[in-house]
Amino acid sequence: MRYFPVLLLAAICHLDAYAQNKPTAWKRHTIDDTSRGADGVRLADVNGDGLMDITTGWEEGGVIRVYLHPGPKKVAEAWPAVTVGKVRSPEDAVFVDLDGDGATDVVSSCEGRTRTMYVHWAPRDKTRYLDSKAWKTEAIPATAGKQSWMFSLPMQIDGRDGVDLIVSSKGRGASVGWLQSPKNPRDLTAWKYHRLYDAGWIMSLVASDVDGDGDPDVVVSDRRGKGRGVLWLENPGAKAAAGGAKWAEHRVGGAGREVMFLDVADLDGDGRDDIVVPIKDTEVHVFRRIGKSADRNADEWSTQIIRLPGELIGRAKGIHVADLNLDGRQDLIFSCEGAKQPKSGVVWLSYRDKPTDKQWQLHDLSGPAGVKFDILQTVDMDGDGDLDVLTCEERDNLGVFWYENPTR
């Protein structure tokens, strides 16, 4: 891994960097670079082999693809893949067995002129999962032409019928809402949309039981508009949600700032989840609960700001919390857009003494290749015991790929 100069970091952004050795960036392994505009990576084990598979929407290429993990011995090669559907301007694709038939489907969200969400129904015959002709694509009528759909989060909300979907959008008429599954999820005309929040440009939807009442709430980053910032929407419970009850809006932080892809994790090991979000152009904000209680009566948050060197990296895009160097402490992985050479587009941060330290150590991960990166995931791709980093890039057409962790 390459390390940034200590003096430059200290002078510019008050971050530490290692002063020893300057190894190369992590090795990059391409999963697929045969279409254009890879936009996000979502994970699930769709074939029950214990390995994480991937779905991605290619925005400019207009295709939704699924990639099956080939096993540790072949993981550095191109993965077996299938185009499960062709749609225009896909912004997101997510795995979910929407009809409960045991075959994992894909739901895509499209912006541009399409402004529609689609279900890509998987074949029930598992031997045909990689056969594109066995997949069927259908629009969800409740979303057709309505909003510039950006992101979808499968979640059981009303406690009945099939899996529901938390959905979000950007621009004119943007919102966070949920799509309620009918008794027969295959009857897409029967799906109902419930609007929860008027939005500007939603980047993240993360399920987390913020108030500790046993049901999942939704943590949101809203990038644009009057209400921009980080917030969470309080799940009113299955019965109330089914009856159309409102979800209370709770503000966390970042008001008036351009917040990007967030992560929810226990960064400091105190047993309570924190919210970590990159903020344009080169900041990371860490929000922690104030007080001993984690219930709805302790809805106050402290803010820690970590500033990064804009001279060395691109503009903030995504964040992910994981222990990359196996030292038992959580690290931060940070992705960028606008990372033109010689800047790096993916870096990681570690703390020296405690996670509340103002100075974090900055480490290169990607090197200068790539310009616009996206959501980050960590998976032990090669089975060697450490976490590798999975993402995608859509300007230099690096496609979908993973970086091999050199720790082991």
Image: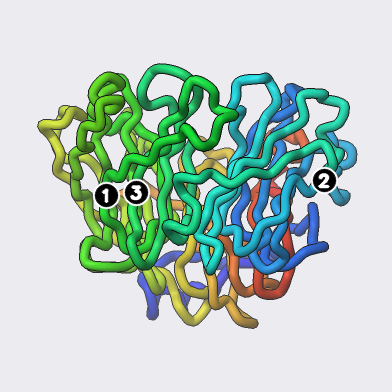
Q: Amino acid at mark 3?
A: Val
Query: Which quarter shows the C terminus?
Result: top right
Residue at screen point 16% across, 31% down: 296
Residue in the foreground of this view, choosing between 224 and 124: 124
Answer whether labels 1 and 3 touch (C-beta < 8 Å): yes
**SS for tag 1?**
strand
Give the mark nearest the N terminus, 1 or 3.
3
The picture places residue 182, in percent across and down from the top left corner, at 46, 25
Which of the two discs, 1 and 2, sits closer to the camera? 1
Q: Would residue 15 be found to the left or right of residue 29 on screen?
A: left
Q: Point out residue 191 in the picture as x, y percentages from the top left corner.
A: 46, 34
Badge 2 amino acid: Ala
Q: Which residue is mark 3?
A: 176
Image mark for residue 81: 2
3D distance between C-alphas at marks 1 and 2: 36 Å
For the point 48% across and 58% down, the residue is 145
Observer-side mark, 3 or 2, equals: 3
Q: Residue 325, can we see it?
A: no
Q: Badge 3, how many Cα within 10 Å: few under 14, some, many 20+?
A: many
Left or right of 371 in this view: 234: left
Q: Quadrant of the N terminus?
A: bottom right
**In the rendered structure, are the residues bearing label 3 and label 2 in contact, judged by CB atoms less than 8 Å apart?**
no
* Viewer-nearest residue: 346 or 328: 346
- Give residue 42's mark: none
Which quarter of the figure has residue 54? Answer: top right
Name the residue nearer the viewer: 60 or 360.
60
Q: Nearer the viewer, residue 407 or 234?
A: 234
* Residue indicated by mark 1: 197
